[in-house]
Amino acid sequence: MENVESSIQRATEFLKSQLSELPQTVVILGSGFAGWVKKLDVEKVIPYSSIPGFPITTIKGHDGNLIVARLASKLVLVMQGRFHFYEGHSLDVISIPLRVFAGLGVRSLIVTNAAGSINHSFKPGDLMLITDHINHSLRYPTFLNGMQSPGLTPYSLRMQGEARRIAEEEELKIHDGTYIFTTGPSYETPAEIKAMRILGADAVGMSTVPEILSAAHCGMEIVAVSMISNYGSGIKDGTLDHQEVMDTMKSIQDRVDRFLMKLTTSTLS
Ligand code: HPA
């Protein structure tokens, strides 16, 4: 396999040649947030497959494009589609886009995702501002072991304040919560959801934490927001499926789009 450092270098050089100016902010779009792209002033769509050194997504329903958009007269990059451990990507590979963005001068990162609720008072359609996380992958050592020092958090307190203020403006329910990252690909059993609650988690998902660790390592200011898309297994009767995730999020799409637009604008100077 190609050396990760050389992938990063090739992707960075390619993107520099493609961009009219350097971007300040990157937004990673998770399931359900994807519709936001329609509201953007899109300058260019760069398929991941055309970026030398970039990984490619393999999931149905997740496009793989880097969108170059203009917002408040600044350039913003949007990841439409992301890379998951359960697709077979190593943590090193998942870190490539973030490290490329850092090389382009990106300073702020907004991460979104869909997550299952663990906390009984979190309902589908609520937002959860990630104020901390539990890396429950426990399967592979990360190059960032030991990064987290006592008292330090990768989650920007300033941007958390902005997110709370904007959610209130848009009448969106937003909870503070701890996100637990699992490698997937299977959803949890009811017993696992119960165990995760005892560990201190409020919502569960299969992305975000590898991205946060990479971006924090690069010194970015980070905010991460989950959309609660379903009850965690065993919290309510019924099975979990992808359609359930999609239907829930459609109903609040417009307000969520405005939330994301304002939050992104708040990072631009
Ligand atoms: N579990 C794991 N990942 C998820 C879930 C879930 O319930 N919902 C969305 N992503």
Image (cartoon, grey):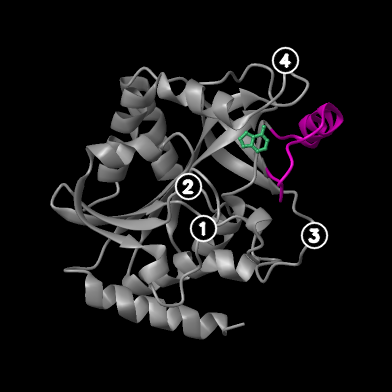
What separation in Å lies between label 2 and label 3 (alpha carbons)? 25 Å
Crowdedness of circle 4 by 10 Å Cα count: few (<14), some, many (20+)?
Answer: few
Residue at image mark 4: 236
Sooner in the amino-acid sequence: mark 4 or mark 2: 2
In the rendered image of this protein, does residue 230 appear above or below residue 163?
A: above
Q: Write the residue at 59% across / 32% down.
A: 242
Label 1 near label 2: C-beta < 8 Å?
yes
Place of residue 43 in the rendered image (x, y in percent of width and height, measured from the top left)? 18, 56
The quadrant of the rendering that contains the N terminus is bottom right
Residue at image mark 2: 62
Label 3 near label 1: C-beta < 8 Å?
no
The answer to whether 202 appears left or right of 31 in the picture is right
Q: Is mark 2 within 8 Å of ligand 1?
A: no
Sooner in the amino-acid sequence: mark 1 or mark 3: 1
Q: Quadrant of residue 104?
A: bottom left
Q: Using the image as rendered, state which of residue 174 and residue 34 is in the foreground.
A: 34
Judged from the image, the secondary structure of the residue bearing numbered disc 4 is loop
Judged from the image, the secondary structure of the residue bearing numbered disc 3 is loop
Q: Which residues are magenta?
A: 181-201
Residue at image mark 1: 57
Q: Is mark 4 within 8 Å of ligand 1?
A: no
> In the drawing, what numbered circle is on residue 172?
none
Q: Using the image as rendered, state which of residue 163 and residue 5 is in the foreground.
A: 5
Place of residue 172 in the rendered image (x, y in percent of width and height, measured from the top left)? 41, 20
What separation in Å lies between label 1 and label 3 (alpha carbons)? 21 Å
User: Ligand 1 is in which quadrant of the figure?
Assistant: top right
Sooner in the amino-acid sequence: mark 1 or mark 4: 1
Q: Amino acid at mark 2?
A: His
